[in-house]
Amino acid sequence: MISTQVKINHYDFENSLFENFSTNHFAKDLWPIVYILSDGETKTAYVGETTDAYSRMGSHLNHEIKSNLTSVHLITSEKFNKSATLDIESNLIKYMSGDNIFKLLNGNLGLANHNYYQKKEVYWDIFNTIWNQLRAEGISKHSIQHIDNSDLFKYSPYKSLTNEQNQGLFQILQSLATGKHENTIVEGGAGTGKTILAIFLFKMLSSRLEDFSFKEFGSEEKVFIDLINQIKELYPNPKMALVVPMSSFRATLKKVFKNIKGLSASMVIGPAQVSKEKYDLLVVDESHRLRRRVNLGAYFGAFDKACQTLNLDKHKSSELDWVTKQSKHTVLFYDEAQSIKPSDAKKEEFDLLKENKQTSILKLKSQFRVRGGNAYVQYVDSLLKNKLKKGAPKYNSKEYEFTLFNSLDAMIEQIKLREKESGLSRLIAGYSWEWKSNKDKNVFDIQIDDVQLKWNGTSNDWINSEGSINEVGCIHTTQGYDLNYSGIIFGNEISFDPEMEEIIIKEENYFDKNGKQSIKDPKELKAFIINIYKTIMLRGIKGTYIYVCDPLLRAYFESFIPKNTSEQVEVKTLFKTEDIKPFENAIPLYDLKAAAGNFGEIQQVEEMEWLNIPDRIKPSKDLFACKVIGESMNKVIQNGAFCLFRKYSGGSRNGQIVLVEHTNMHDSDFGSCYTVKEYESKKYEDENGWKHQSIILRPLSTDSTYENIVLEDEDLTTFKVVGTFECILE
């Protein structure tokens, strides 16, 4: 077992530590080890790895700051080698930062990002074992999956940069050190790692040089060190800020900065604050959302006041002018394709800045967010711009789910299942419905057939807000955020012209008042709406689901996007609607959510749903079918599969997959007292014969978060095996 291969020993961090090391052969015999120095009172920690524990601890005990730490956890294993300890150190830094129990003293930003023998097969399991042991000791708190979904982890600077990002960082630092350029424009599409690079830059400039490791820069290590030295000589205490135009995303990044050692929430500001003081460095994330004087609503007054303070013409200037005027050096992260409002600064302003000799330009192309990579991004762009040829193959990727739904109900169901499985799964829509529920909480905003939905109940950090899984977000509550799965509703404002073979806009169905009032050119309105849909289609890390209201646009999408297979299977192959002969050519389909203890009661034929009996199965009144929901059995049964069961009539069930009922049990996938699991029984013998000691219901899942259900004592009295699994119905 892996758990026996890892030990974590706790010592007081003081000089007596070396005497204790004499009994630890890993420390004594120069084995590669990983360690955590911490102080429970200040909640400060440092993570490291070494092959010389004595020497390294001696250095730390003499360190001005680290010597104040009080405990050391030594992590050892006979499985460790240098590559493994570097990797585990890197993961501990990343996940402890995301866990947010301790603030890390580490200046090195993760570093290890290389492959080595059995990295995935063995060492990821070892890291999980280490993490769980640290949870038991109170050093870590949250699960790996929870941290993976957190904003603090997603935007953590404790990660290795790619070669492309390294080159971008080098170019920015060079401009700062030499003063050759006043502005740097970093162009990159959605998901290319712009925000990560911005935060990495802040962490680098805020760390002490001696605490920062430059090893990941390889042969360019010395060049980076020289640049940082030059910058620190020019700006010993640089006044810098990260400007974020969107208030919701700004609030999220404030939380991130607050929890990173050396950074503070006050470093993240809105554009209006820029007019109040001068800066050495301003970095603008999502700079395409900087505003001009169009449809600003209540913000008109503050905009005009800032322009007056800066002696700028309010009718001709924009927040882009404020930023460049108030800073010695400006870094602008920019994506023309994500400009989605008429109040956004014009593309022409950025073009003029690019032509300036004082501006350096660099591009980020690699896709980090979407697992479909650049191929998916290009496919979406071509789809929305009508560049895909008739008869071209539909999108197909083993790495990414891109699926078209005929039923909105089915898509909502799948998004909620993905939310249960991996979290961060949300519905998003275009502006095809008015926002009425912001004034009257009792009304629904979106009505599609029998489905009623509401827009987002809050504009501030909606994705992470309570109840957001039951609402629909828009571009303004999702831009800049990551999701695992997104369900996109294309509204009635966007359609397709079969004769012209292009996407068209129906302005009468577009309900963004600001957009309608200020955009007079139909081509400009179309460009904004296409940008909105492209941006929200690039939110999902693992998958994007699509539902289209307009029948002509749906027909166009059907040529290029794979359909949801579960909808097709249910309609085409399984359900029997004619010549139904119960238990001769059809078997009943029971709904686990609706069954409520009435399993097996034969209803009237016309009231039941019936499925075809496969040719290979002999008809029997003992057969029935159920739809198995969730991922708890996905090693055998896929989510949403229709399964054939045989009523249980006695005999051993050990090792079999069974459908069981228990009145006190609640399965999160089914939402009822039924569950499908692998059965194991432990028995004991007394004077009355053999009895159950406990029953274990095991999940068979690739998702390790599913746990055994253990039934003991009084639980066994209300436990019932309803049926044994026969096969999946295809």
Image (spheres, rainbow, N blue to C red):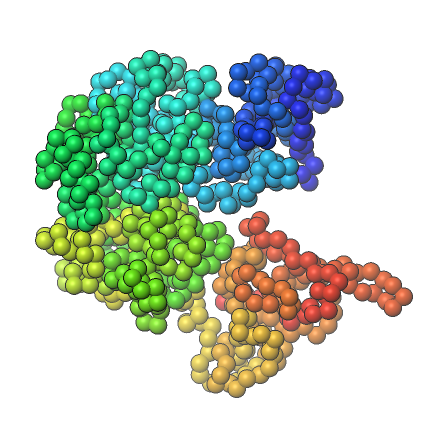
> Which x, y percent locates residue 79?
64, 30
Instruction: Identify the residue at horizontal 87%, vertical 63% (top origin).
Output: 686
Q: Is residue 447 left or right of residue 499?
A: right
> Which x, y percent locates residue 547?
32, 61
- Can residue 549 be seen by looking at this rendering? yes
Q: Nearer the viewer, residue 18 or 392?
A: 18
- Residue 164 vs 460, above or below: the answer is above
- Residue 346 vs 178, above or below: the answer is below
- The quarter of the displayed image where residue 277 is located: top left
Instruction: Identify the residue at horizontal 53%, vertical 19% (top origin).
Output: 65
Q: Nearer the viewer, residue 402 or 510?
A: 510
In the image, farthest residue toward the right = 687
Q: Where's the N terminus, which quadrant?
A: top right
- Residue 355 vs 579, above or below: the answer is above
Q: Nearer the viewer, residue 637 or 250?
A: 250
- The quarter of the displayed image where residue 416 is located: bottom left
